[in-house]
Amino acid sequence: MKKTTPKTKNSFSALLAPLINYSPVANFNKLSECDAIIYFFGAKEAKNKQKNIEALVETHALDFQIDELKKSDKKNIHFIGRNGPVWIVFESAPTNTDHSGILNESGYAFARDQFGTVLNQVRALKLKSVSIYFQGATPEVTEGAVVGMELASYVFINHLKLSAVKAEPLNVQLNIKSENLTAALQKVSAVQIARHLTNLPPNIVNPATVEQLAFDLPFSNNTEIIVWDEKKCEAEGMGLLIATGAGSPTAPRMVHFKYRPKAKANAKNKKPIAFVGKGVTFDTGGLDIKPSAAMRMMKKDMGGAAAVFALAFWADSSGYDRPCDFYLALAENSVDGFSMRPGDVYKSRAGFLVEIDNTDAEGRLVLSDVMDVAAKKTGADEPEYLIDIATLTGAIKVALGGDTAGLFSNDDKLANQIVAAGQRSGEPNWRMPLIQKMWGDLGSQFADFKNSGGGFGGAITAALFLQKFANGKKWAHLDVYCWTDKSTGALSGGSATGQPVQSVIEWLESV
């Protein structure tokens, strides 16, 4: 039976157009009059908090509000005064923890979530313009404020309905430097692309349409797009990737964004950074099929690839100053007579024989073959770092919750850098152990090793499996949830978060 690529009735590019050609929800400009005012005071202004509250309350509040508002000790004070709505927001100093500060809320994260909340309130009041005054705020804080407003503005269905009229932009006056505004919008556009790509339904998103999107995005001449189709993957010996997608009518493939910033003088002096994203566009679990409740949101199983896709777009659009390679490992784990079975043995591109213990442990299979491609590049293309991003295990969510990524690495310096970047970006990454003796859980009588095994430490054994394919490179694995089940900060509940785009951009800007 020959498999074909199904055609979608909707234009995939059109569904992404609002985010590809990113248009901010706010028009950032200078206005003479506004419907509302937001005052933001940085942490350095904490000593003047009461003085600032009293002055602003006297200026804006109605007489009956003044006494009560002056007593407020909230971080976010809101009232409708003489000339309209007013918000007064105070950045609080970080609360010390016993984890060396890596769980402290950064100024960026605080401003992002506070302004995301305020944006929703502004929209609920149907306001058309707002002035924002920053006092004593760092560039990181002002960037967080812009990112928060933009993240809060995203409503998936508005982009899915192609005929929907776009909401009238909010006119915003704010006193920040234009380069800080540009950086914030470049970052948030990447996050929005990752969120939207993950949110799109699986009848629209499959390996073929993701490939189509790669060529439809407005990448510059600094980025070359290379696709290995099913035949090329087979010729390259990528038996694990091919086996994962064997049950789907849409063939698996690898998409590679090769970013080489020709205009950057120092780019030639740095080795590339390679990223690999898990792109299982829908995961039924295969023949070890998931329970129906566990399958509901499995369109998000390509969240890692969506993040890597978005990072490629960010690097190209921002003119990032060092070479990078972004790989998408794309397959659909479906069920038919061609599906891989428990007990099957497949040869990986790296030469290892892998026994299929569980067809629902497929993410490590697609990643491993593509990681081998990235890790074995030579010469000018040899990577200094290899980073994989994947919605890999439910075990990591049980251990850390949905907001914190599990970080595994074979390099202490790299791991510490990524943890620090997560703290600064308000997208925490928590380092987990690579307990080598647990490798025995993946032992096999019929192959070099199995793809799963044992009932405990599932996130660790998955990471140990992937480490086999890092080829000795400085490697980090981010096991992410990339979804929020409840509204929090700038994000609305029941949708993709774009994790870990913000923290990885923060890391990239520091290396």
Image (cartoon, rainbow, N blue to C red):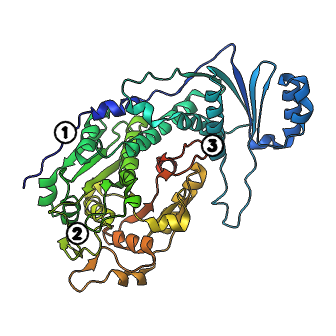
At mark 1, the secondary structure is loop
| Image-based side of 269 in relation to 343, left or right | right
Residue 90 visible? The answer is yes
Residue farthest to the right, as pictured: 67
* Residue type indicated by callout 3: Asp
Mark earlier in primary sequence (2, 3): 3
Mark 1 crowd level (few <14, some 14–19, many ≥20, 10 Å Cα) = few
Mark carried by residue 356:
none
The quarter in which the N terminus is drawn is bottom left
Q: Residue at x 38, y 29 (%)?
A: 161
For the point 72% across and 25% down, the residue is 37
Q: Position of residue 265 (x, y in %)?
A: 39, 40
Residue 150 in the image: above or below residue 303: above
The residue to which callout 1 is attached is 7
Q: Is residue 48 left or right of residue 210?
A: right
Task: Indicate which disc residue 113 carries.
Answer: 3
Q: Which structural element holds mark 3?
A: helix
Label 1 vs label 2, nearer the camera: 1
Task: Give the vertical position of 272 relative to 174 (above or below).
Answer: below
Which residue corresponds to mark 2?
A: 350
Task: Name which of mark 1 and mark 2 comes first in the sequence.
Answer: 1
Type of residue at label 2?
Ala
